[in-house]
Amino acid sequence: MDEMINLQSEEDLSPDDGIQVVAFRLGKEEYAVDILHVQEIVRLLSITRVPRSAKHIEGVVNLRGNIVAIINLHKRFNIASAGEVEDKRIVVFQFDDLKAGIIVDEVSEVLALNSKDIEETDKVYSSMSSDFIKGIARLEDRLFLLLDLQKIVE
Amino acid sequence: MKMDMSQYLDVFLEESKEHLESLNQKLLDLEKNSGDIAALNEIFRAAHTLKGMSSTMGFEDLADLTHHMENVLSDLKEGLLEVNSQVVDILFQCFDRIQLIIERIESNGSGEMDNSELVMILEGIKRGNFQMTTPTTGSVQNSKQEESLKKPPYSNTSSFEFNQYDMTLMREAASRNFNSIYIKLVVDSGCLMKSVRAFMVFKALEEDSEIIKSLPPAADLEEGKFEEKIELLVISASPSSELEKRLNAISEIKVMEIKEIDLASLSPDTLPEANGNLISGSQDLHKESKGMQKGHKVKQTVRVDIDRLDVLMNLVGELVMHKGRLEQIGAISKIAELNETIEQIDRISGDLQSVVMKVRMVPVEQVFNRFPRMVRDLAKELNREVDFLIEGKETELDRTVIDEIGDPLVHLLRNAIDHGVESPQDRLKRGKTQKATVMLRARHEGNNVYIEVEDDGAGINIKRVMEKAVEKGIISLKEAELMSPEEAIQILFNPGFTTTENITDVSGRGVGLDVVKTKIESLSGEIFVDSRPGQGTRFKIKLPLTLAIIQALMISVSQEIYAIPLGSVDETTMIKSEDIKAVQNQEVIVLRGNVLPLFRLASLLEIPGDVTKKDEMYVVIVRKGERQIGLVVDTLIGQQEIVIKSLGRILTGIPGIAGAIVSGDGFVRLIIDVATLF
């Protein structure tokens, strides 16, 4: 019975049709990714450069014996890195058999977003690298760009 | 109600494939030597098991087909049918069909397929309706259709047949001056205790004779379970007249027919292959079958999911890595006790590693076994006569390599048969044997396995290769003139190159060779060609024993550390800057009289920062194919055992990078792939 109640209360936390996201900072902008794809968030590990790879690939790290490719979104989106080195994190995510990490300037929080708070990208954001943006979420006076991780690794 | 069998499906599929493989292989043996009883028995056993399995699993169409196949096989076994090329062809067709059905089951779970045409042919064969082209057909036109070629003419009214075993015994008997006698008896219809009469018959005969076969079987006779007729095959010291007299003395028994079997009239036509080796007698035959059974005693094995082995391998990899770290610590701290323990761990982890590697090793047999059938079919299709020889199929390779090596070998074998080997007529014209030889050879040498595909055909026509290459614009006419034969052969590996005038559906010489080369290189292997005009061609593939743990030379360039697989390192040397010469803007060095191109690893790997000019520098001499190349590096760190890890999907296919390792200090280091670096 206890478990049932717990489950119930958790469902209350995530509203209908909504998603939970991990919110983080890239430069001065705030971004978010679906928490279901996030495997873990780790401190900045020493990254080994991979020669002859694409520009936005920062390199590879050793994550408990596994080799994980690290993507530099700053380079991809042309955003200057900001904040303290101490705050930087690697957000490791996974789809099926594909694992990769992105470097973020700071991980702020885990948020529950209502679907009504999320707007389609093309309504607001037609110019920039909208391919990688799933939508924009508004929460109080903050704006979060929802990243499409799958597109980013492709 | 149907039981849920899905959980057994995997086992079923795997085992069926194994049985199918052995069917194909043994039938090939049988085709080569139609007297090969062991092969026939093996085929029968495999077919029987397959039938049982498929009907248990509810694949009725498969069960039905194998059932009919088994009927024919059983007749072959009993000697009722003769092993000839048509029967063999039909059986091969059946095997193909079975394979198709199994593949279907694997892909969509349904084994339904209409096999009626094959079943009809099989039934036809069994009834003897099948058109036999052997010369004996005409002489034996029996009223009863199930009667076989081997049946003696006088037994028209009986259903008594001799199999190989009977023949052997009879021959044995003849060689010792015993008579083989066929007897047909009738027990009086009013007889009350038929079993007693039968017993008396046996008793009368056994004085100086041996009953080697009876119909109905002896057990039935003893229980009186028979109508009136008894047929016997007897080997006796007495002539038939003596036996007849003795039998007729038993009341209520009447001899209908008694005849000494003339072996000479029986054997030469009907059992051409059975001569010679079978004369040795029954004892030997018994021994043989016993020995065979021993050989069949299967080693106890466990089927393990390959993924689990991979996990195990990874864990051992981690262990080896941390052992490396421990060794570093031990070397620094210089504590005797610690170093002793490290030595122990080193030994154990070494053993563990070799055991795990061995577990992952499988004999190349697994791949090779499907080739004889393929070569046979291909040779038939292309009208070539080919002796296909396999050597060293017990050579073991890592599972991952085995899985990948099949396709390239298929390519090479097809090329050998389609283009290497000439037609029988051409061969005779050139004074060669009519039958060509294609060899598939595997052998183990150091840390490598060599696989060779060799034919004794026409060899590669280098002139034509060059002409084609010029025609296709792969090389210029001038280049062609300067080319050595070795270089010209390398053109074969150029993508899209082919010299075939009429492209068959099988292959064109050269088509796919670039694919073969790419595949081999992706396995960290190399391929060499050796061809002599008029004498044949040999493709030699060199493969590493395993792809998981290898020895590597660790080097550094600027701040970065890389691993170069020791397999591609020839030597290391130190040169002075004045040793470097330039030829057409390419730096070269002269090493013991050989001119080698020299590359700076820092610029090949786009390492940021200035390239420091030094007076002395280390050069790693690496080997790419048959060529040596010098690589300038900053320092040589040393030799190390490394566990290769994949860079993952995002970073696959970067030229020059074969993978990554996690070094003892926890950093990721990249492995240089010499084959694709330049």
Image (cartoon, rainbow, N blue to C red):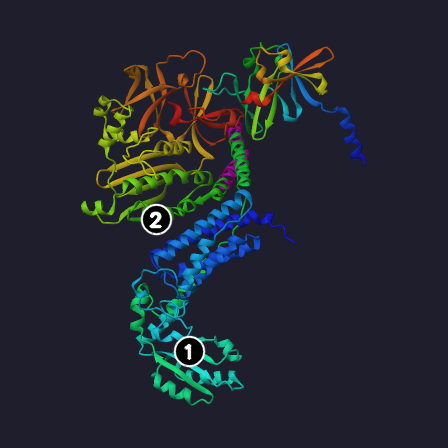
Q: Counting residues from the N terminus, which is met first, the one under dot 2 or under dot 1?
A: 1
Lateral position of residue B567 relative to residue B336, left or right:
left
Amino acid at dot 1: Leu
Q: Circles 2 and 1: CB distance less than 8 Å?
A: no
Residue B83 at x, y percent in the picture: 36, 60
Q: Quadrant of residue B590?
A: top left
Q: Nearer the viewer, residue B178 or B58?
A: B58
| Residue at 33% from the left image edge and 24% from the top image edge | B629
Q: Quadrant of residue B294?
A: bottom left
> What SS does tag 2 mark?
helix
Q: What are the residue bounds of the magenta stretch? A: B326-352
Residue B474 at x, y percent in the picture: 29, 24
Mark 2 → mark 1, Cα distance in angstroms: 43 Å
Residue B443 at x, y percent in the picture: 36, 43
Amino acid at dot 2: Arg
| Residue at 31% from the left image edge and 78% from the top image edge | B177
Residue, disc 1? B232
Instruction: Give the numbered dot on residue B376.
Output: 2
